[in-house]
Image: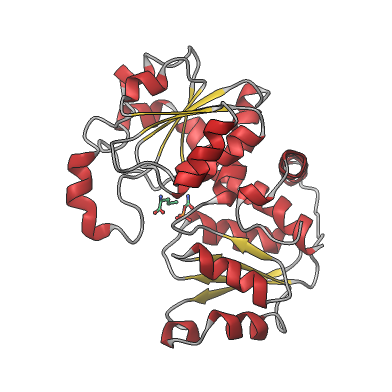
Amino acid sequence: MKHLLKLGDLSTEQIIEILDLADTLKAEKKAGIEHHHLKGKTLGMIFTKASTRTRVSFEVGMYQLGGNALFLSGNDLQIGRGEPIEDTARVLSRFLDGIMIRTFKQDDVEKLAEYGSIPIINGLTDYCHPCQVLADLQTIREFKGKLAGLKLAFIGDGNNMANSLIVGCIKVGMSVSIACPNGYEPDADIVKWGQAQGKLTITNNPLEAAEGADVVYTDVWASMGQEGEAQIRRKAFEGFQVNDALMAKANDGAMVLHCLPAHREEEITAKVLEAHANEIFEEAENRMHAQKAVLVKLMK
Ligand code: CP
Ligand code: NVA
């Protein structure tokens, strides 16, 4: 494994290895055991979109691994003034030991990997959010004791989260059902792949998707960069909400996950969010443990 650009690039074994290492690093952290696997190493973190969890979890994670993290805002880098990714990649590769990038186009992340000579980690693009789904899988396994055979229902926009959940969950033996309005389906190639595995269903009916689910997942209706469509989307996604009626369709003891930030009373009610806060905030914490595992795998 040279980079983490998207989950489609990883084998099932590689995903499970990351989750196992994430569990070990989490247990060591809780026990107060230091693990300076990346002593003297520096991670550059390029952000052209906002972030709370990704930024803080990567920065603190690098510190805990004995290394350093540099926050590089897209506005302050020359990228913001048009310097090509190809040149940025070759320059930064001479200073840094790895780069985490959060941006719009998946192609920019792939280009960074192509032209650079250090590991590249995708910290979210419009296409996918692999780091989030590794933390999600770690959380599901922690609460449910297994992954294979479970069903995840995703309610809402067929966005970056939906794309990565389909790939990540199916690779570890789960099935996925997506409920989204017409015109808001996940990436067509990912849908084709999931359906070919016989592990993916897509419906317009949220209650149907939630039927028999072990994990119910949702995300915002308007992602970063879609602020201008928020009004239209609020209408299109009416009814695509995780609420008590929907949870009644899920299996007893079903978990609720949300990558956060959440918009209460839009994609999820405050009541359901608070009832599952222990799961959702463990999921947020696991961002750090899962990413530390990725950093060790790629940079040690
Ligand atoms: N879930 C997630 O990626 O959060 P941030 O946007 O705060 O990084
Ligand atoms: N779909 C959301 C996820 C945020 C973590 C977005 O891209 O804004």
Q: Is residue 212 above or below residue 151?
A: above
Residue at 63% of width from left, 79% of height from top? 89
210 sits left or right of 264 in the view: right
In which quadrant of the rendered image does the N terminus lie?
bottom right
Q: How many marks?
A: 0
Q: Nearer the viewer, residue 247 or 192?
A: 192
Q: Is residue 240 above or below residue 150?
A: below
Q: Nearer the viewer, residue 9 or 34?
A: 9
Q: Nearer the viewer, residue 218 or 164?
A: 164
Residue at 25% of width from left, 35% of height from top? 265
123 sits left or right of 157 in the view: right
**Residue 44, visible in the rendered structure:** no
In which quadrant of the rendered image does the C terminus lie?
bottom right
217 sits left or right of 130 in the view: left
| Image colouring | secondary structure
Question: Residue 149 occupies which quadrant of the picture?
Answer: top right
Q: Position of residue 110 (x, y in %)?
A: 59, 66
Residue at 43% of width from left, 16% of height from top? 250
Question: Residue 204 occupies which quadrant of the picture?
Answer: top left
Q: Nearer the viewer, residue 265 or 169?
A: 169
Q: Position of residue 241 (x, y in %)?
A: 30, 31
Q: Position of residue 221 (x, y in %)?
A: 31, 45
Q: Position of residue 290 (x, y in %)?
A: 66, 47
Q: Is residue 77 above or below residue 175?
A: below
Residue at 52% of width from left, 66% of height from top? 107
**Residue 255, visible in the rendered structure:** yes
